[in-house]
Image: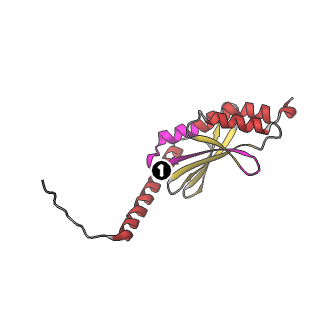
C-alpha cells in the first residue's frame, strides 16, 4: 500500500506562538472563574488582592487562623500561607518532623524562608483546576496545620511552654 504525502504550507513559529499565548490566556481566565466561583460560595473572610490574586482566612479546629494567598499564575494556581515563626529551640527536630510529615501529605508542602519562618505552599496546574480540587487543597491546608501545630509548638518553644 502506498501512502500519499501531503505537504501543508508552513504557518511559521509566529502563528504557533499566538495560538499558545491565546490558549494560556483562556486557561488562566477559566482558572480565575473557578476561583471566583468557589470563593463566592464560601462564608469565609476574603478579599481580592489583584486581578488574579485573593487572600482568604481559613480557620481550623485548633483555633489557628490561616491567611491563605491564592494566585493564578501563567500555568499554576499557587496557594501560600504563613505557618509559624522560626523555632527558638530544637530547630533540627522541628524541620525533621515537617520533612517526615511531607511524605504523607497531598499537594501541600512545608517550606522555609531565609529567616527560618515556616510556610505552607501548594501549586496546582491550571488545566486541571476545579472547585472540588480547590476545596480539597484548602482543606488540606487546614488539616495539616491543625495536625502539626501543637507538636511544632511543643518542640520549637519547649522552654517557653513549661
Give the quarter of the image for residue 18.
bottom left
Q: Is residue 99 left or right of residue 78?
A: right
- In the image, 152 versus 51, the foreground residue is 152
Give the quarter of the image for residue 27.
bottom left
- In the image, 98 versus 122, the foreground residue is 98
Report how many numbered discs are placed on residues in the image: 1
The magenta-colored residue range is 113-139
Give residue 101's position: percent from left, percent from top. 65, 34
Give residue 119's position: percent from left, percent from top. 68, 45
Residue holding disc 1:
126
Residue 114 among magenta residues: yes
Give residue 133's position: percent from left, percent from top. 49, 40
Q: Residues within 10 Å of mark 1 (few under 14, many from 20)?
A: many
At horizontal 58% and vertical 54% (from top left) the residue drawn is 53
At horizontal 38% and vertical 63% (from top left) the residue drawn is 19
Residue 150 among magenta residues: no
Q: Is residue 71 above or below residue 150?
A: below
Residue 55 in sight: yes
Q: Secondary structure at mark 1?
A: helix
- In the image, 117 versus 38, the foreground residue is 117
Give the quarter of the image for residue 151.
top right
Q: Is residue 110 left or right of residue 153?
A: left
Give residue 86's position: percent from left, percent from top. 77, 44
Residue 43 in sight: no
Amino acid at each position: 500500500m502506498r501512502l500519499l504525502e501531503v505537504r501543508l504550507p508552513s504557518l511559521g513559529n509566529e502563528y504557533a506562538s499566538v495560538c499558545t499565548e491565546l490558549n494560556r490566556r483562556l486557561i488562566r481566565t477559566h482558572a480565575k472563574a473557578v476561583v471566583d466561583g468557589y470563593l463566592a460560595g464560601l462564608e469565609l473572610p476574603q478579599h481580592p488582592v489583584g486581578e488574579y490574586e485573593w487572600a482568604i482566612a481559613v480557620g481550623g479546629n485548633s483555633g489557628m487562623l490561616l491567611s491563605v494567598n491564592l494566585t493564578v499564575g501563567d500555568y499554576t494556581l499557587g496557594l501560600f500561607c504563613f505557618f509559624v515563626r522560626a523555632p527558638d529551640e530544637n530547630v533540627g527536630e522541628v524541620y525533621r518532623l515537617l520533612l517526615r510529615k511531607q511524605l504523607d501529605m497531598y499537594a501541600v508542602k512545608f517550606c522555609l524562608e531565609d529567616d527560618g519562618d515556616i510556610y505552607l505552599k501548594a501549586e496546582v496546574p491550571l488545566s486541571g483546576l476545579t472547585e472540588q480540587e480547590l476545596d480539597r487543597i484548602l482543606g488540606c491546608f487546614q488539616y495539616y496545620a491543625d495536625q502539626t501545630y501543637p507538636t511544632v509548638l511543643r518542640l520549637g518553644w519547649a522552654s517557653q511552654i513549661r
